[in-house]
């Protein structure tokens, strides 16, 4: 077990290092103009971040609102709405490109009019500017709020520009969930926009359960089977580790699958067919793999070869489809670019660990083959033919 457990430990350590270094939030961001803000928040939708300094004594609020993954043909807006968590009544800061430079201005949004016309806000605004760099649009401003106002309703938005004119933003999905109360003193945003909050939470639960089980645990379980098997000392152990990993992945995965089904039933009108169909195929293949365990022929049974072929191809198909479906889900949920990056990073980590272990496995197998064929030679010379010549199956890589 020695070599095997070392390899496993090493993979786990490598994996956790990789995973932790990509959990990026607003905290680790540095502004190119060296501005420093003491508070920040990763806003729940639209890949946006709010950084701020709030002085209770002067009621001034310095903000930097960042929207990532943008292009210069986008407009962005961040607003405080004294009237509630809605668009109407928003006191908005707006930015978009105008004759080659990003330009910021204020716009009070009276009703559901969409022209984002310039006008004075209900509170003072100074030092308003905007910048665009590295697919990020940032609005900087200093606001003077009313005395003692420490909780505000914030609304943020993004949309396309056509011929220099801001167009109406998307009216579904994340663009309709981009409101939250902001506690200026505690770095907390809570969505109180009616039913969307609990639904968003359930979407996140579905996303996390599914990504962890189908997207991460299953590939790890497959790697255990493939790479621990080669260590003779890990012989029954790899099997139980593989079973333990895959059954827990399956259990969590089914929970994720069920939350997904429920979300699908609830979201009348919106259908994500590809995501749903891959999900159904995954559930079926996963269940089949569970039965495969129970119906497994003995190692030396003549059908064992066919069972192996079936089990491996179904297993690899599940892994590939799972990864595709995690990306599909990320497209639908749009939880922010960092989540996608984090998942890609995990995949790269797992991939490099697998490549490394693949090399180790081949090295061991080839060495073992050489040793046994040396012995074989030796035995022929010593006329003890046939004792070591028959591979016992543990040499096989696949
Ligand atoms: C925010 O406050 C910190 C600490 O008080 C200060 O160093 C920083 O310059 C302030 N940032 C802005 C943009 O005012
Ligand atoms: C905004 O306020 C300034 C000074 O308070 C005033 O001069 C200007 O006309 C106002 N602009 C609009 C569009 O009302
Ligand atoms: C705001 O602008 C004024 C004048 O341009 C400048 O003196 C001041 O430093 C700026 N304040 C901040 C916080 O950027």
Image (cartoon, grey):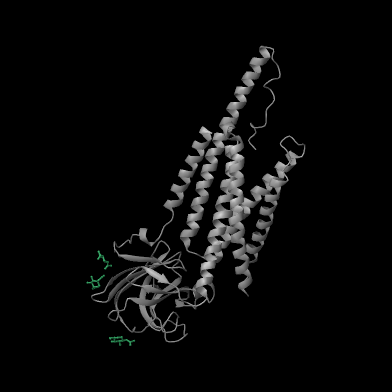
Q: Quadrant of the C terminus?
A: top right
Answer left or right for 339 relative to 57: right
Residue nearer the viewer, 121 or 149: 149
Q: Quadrant of the N terminus?
A: top right
The image quadrant that residue 278 belongs to is bottom right
Count of labels shown? 0
Residue nearer the viewer, 246 or 76: 246
Residue 341 in view of the camera = yes
Is 32 rendered above or below residue 292? below
The image quadrant that residue 330 belongs to is bottom right
- Furthest-right residue in this view: 302
Percent of width and height locating residue 378:
64, 15
Percent of width and height locating residue 341:
48, 56
Percent of width and height locating residue 324:
60, 56
The image quadrant that residue 367 belongs to is top right
The quarter of the image that holds ligand 2 is bottom left
Is 393 rendered above or below residue 348? above
Answer left or right for 188 relative to 393: left
Residue nearer the viewer, 256 or 348: 256
Residue 324 in view of the camera = no
Percent of width and height locating residue 62:
30, 71
Is 175 rendered above or below residue 398? below
């Amino acid at each position: 077990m020695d070599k095997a457990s070392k390899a496993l430990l090493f993979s786990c350590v490598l994996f956790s290092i990789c995973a932790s270094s990509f959990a990026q939030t607003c905290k680790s961001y540095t502004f190119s103009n060296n501005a420093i803000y003491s508070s920040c928040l990763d806003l729940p939708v639209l890949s946006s971040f709010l950084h701020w300094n709030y002085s209770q004594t002067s009621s001034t609020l310095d903000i930097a609102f960042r929207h990532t993954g943008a292009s210069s043909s986008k407009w962005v807006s961040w607003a405080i709405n004294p009237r509630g968590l809605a668009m109407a009544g928003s006191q908005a800061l707006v930015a978009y490109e105008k004759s080659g430079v990003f330009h910021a201005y204020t716009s009070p949004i009276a009703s559901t009019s969409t022209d984002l016309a310039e006008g004075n806000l209900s509170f003072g605004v100074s030092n308003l500017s905007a910048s665009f760099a590295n697919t990020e649009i940032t609005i900087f401003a200093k606001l003077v709020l009313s005395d003692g106002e420490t909780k505000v309703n914030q609304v943020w938005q993004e949309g396309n520009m056509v011929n220099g004119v801001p167009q109406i933003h998307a009216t579904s999905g994340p663009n309709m969930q981009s409101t939250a109360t902001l506690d200026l003193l505690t770095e907390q945003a809570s969505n109180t926009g009616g039913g969307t909050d609990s639904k968003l939470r359930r979407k996140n639960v579905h996303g996390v359960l599914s990504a962890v089980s189908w997207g991460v645990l299953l590939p790890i379980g497959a790697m255990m089977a493939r790479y621990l098997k080669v260590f003779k000392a890990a012989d029954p152990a790899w099997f139980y580790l593989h079973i333990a990993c895959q059954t827990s992945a399956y259990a969590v995965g089914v929970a994720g699958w069920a939350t997904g089904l429920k979300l699908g039933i609830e979201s009348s009108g919106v259908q994500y067919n590809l995501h749903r169909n891959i999900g159904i195929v995954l559930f079926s293949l996963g269940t089949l793999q569970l039965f495969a365990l129970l119906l497994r022929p003995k190692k030396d049974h003549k059908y064992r070869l066919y069972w192996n072929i079936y089990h491996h191809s179904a297993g690899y198909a599940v892994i590939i489809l799972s990864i595709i479906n995690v990306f599909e889900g990320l497209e639908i949920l749009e939880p922010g670019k960092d989540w996608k990056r984090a998942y890609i990073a995990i995949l790269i980590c797992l991939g490099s660990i697998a490549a490394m272990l693949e090399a180790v496995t081949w090295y061991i197998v080839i060495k073992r083959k050489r040793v046994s064929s040396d012995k074989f030679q030796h035995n022929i010379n010593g006329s003890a033919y046939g004792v070591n010549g028959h591979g016992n199956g543990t040499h096989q890589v696949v």
